[in-house]
Amino acid sequence: MSELTAILTTIDGAIWGLPLIILLLGTGIYFTLRLGFLQFRKLPLAFHYIFHGDSEENDENGDVSGFQALCTALSSTIGTGNIVGVATAIAAGGPGALFWMWVSAFFGIATKYSECLLAHKYRVKDENGQIAGGPMYYIQNGLHSKVLAKIFALFGVGVALLGIGTFTQVKSISDALTLSFNIPNYVTAIVLTLLVAFITIGGIHRIAHVAEKIIPFMCIFYITGVVLILVTHLSAIPGVFYLIVKTAFVPSSVVGGGIGIAMQKGIARGIFSNESGLGSAPIAAAAAKTESHVEQGLISMTGTFIDTIIVCTMTGLAILIMNANTTGLEGAAMTTYAFQNGLFIPYVGKYIVNIGLVFFAFTTIIGWNYYGERCMYYLKGLKAVKVYKIIYIVFIAIGPFMTLDFIFILADIVNGLMAIPNLIGLIGLRKVVYEETMNYFKAPEKQHVTVDELAEESA
């Protein structure tokens, strides 16, 4: 296993080298500038649309509501990346890795908006009347490249089966349950396998209903715990921010990392967490009943803001405030240490982290099952989807018995491979994104929308 891990580490370093980092950041920077910093100017409007949709929802034009589509997307993004991924990024790249997670997220919001807009625009219906959409469809029907679309779908299945969808989540759940409740791995494997089988066989409707109930509750539950740590350690926060920025650019033998490793790990783990540019969230966005492509793009882009700018930042601050990164611990154990020592009530921190991790990771599993299913449908049709679901469920059973380093390296590799064709498609369709956006906001009723007006309308 160690030899295979070494080989995969070399491949991971090659894939997540400077070219892919430039492609990821460059795409986000381009859309940020071209759309006039839309992720900053229109963020209040985007949150308004989540709860007060502007356009009509039509059952004939989608499978789930815009909010359910966002929750489905969040179910796949808010997971181990926010708890384990942040810890592993800081452990490998130093505190500066968190800075590069912010950079990737800021520009990634514009990327997420663009890819979800395109997915909604180019979606189709399958033989069962369900919506099928995502990068494979806008690459094929918008960019007119069937080969590139198939490459994306193939890597999408790979990420679902080998990356974010199965091993990383299941292993994290297993470790969390063992740490908190001494539950054996084999028990976790059996229970998870049965639960995932029940939910995923029910399709997007059951997945969306589970996601919209669990995600808001777990976000509040986890964030409340982090806020308590930050509030009780306010004096340490300025120093931690200084450390993050300093080590993002200046190598340090004391805290680890350096600009090269910090940038690589920060961006890689940022993408692992918020999936901007990866091409996954557009698959969920395509299923939304929302009739406006731009509106769904705005709703979807809030996912990156919530995931990385809020949740990952809070986790990273808690780890650094409590110096958990200097303990030699890794993954969930590092975050658990921060919560255990940061909260004044004994043992509460351990349960907040690990119960939160279990639910976040579980929703990621069911969300990525849907993504992989849609990619498999594109490649081989409905019959292949049944085979895919069986393989997915089997891989869930295997996950608890794998090593954390191996599965995170494997996940990074397939994530990078999936992102490349999607980013090429986004760049090729950049004019479509710009024209759709400009046409939407040039409409008389869309001009001069202010935050005050949104508040008055909500009231």
Image (tube, rainbow, N blue to C red):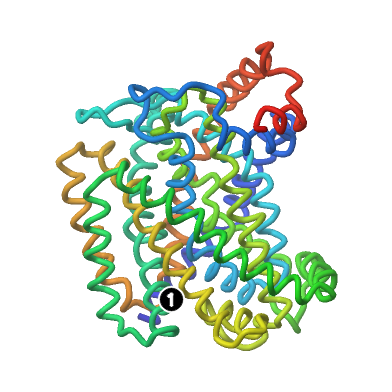
Residue 378 in sight: yes
- 216 to 362, vertically: above or below: above
Classify residue 186 as left or right of residue 417. left
Classify residue 261 as left or right of residue 236. left
Classify residue 209 as left or right of residue 430. left
Q: Give the position of the C terminus as an image quadrant.
A: top right
Question: Amino acid under label 1?
Answer: Leu
User: Going 43% across and 46% down the picture, which residue do you hit?
Assistant: 72
Looking at the image, which residue sits at the far front? 459
Q: Give the position of the N terminus as an image quadrant.
A: bottom left
Quarter-of-image position of residue 83: bottom right
In the image, 445 versus 74, the foreground residue is 445
The total of numbered circles placed on residues is 1
Residue 30 in sight: no
Question: Where's residue 389, x and y in %?
Answer: 22, 53
Looking at the image, which residue sits at the far top? 444
Quarter-of-image position of residue 397: bottom left
Question: Where's residue 228, x and y in %?
Answer: 68, 72
Classify residue 55 as left or right of residue 240. left
* Mark 1 neighbour class, 10 Å CA radius: few under 14, some 14 to 19, many 20 or more: some
The residue under label 1 is 404
In the image, 148 versus 164, the foreground residue is 164
User: Going 67% across and 65% down the picture, which residue do you hit?
Assistant: 314
Q: Secondary structure at mark 1?
A: helix
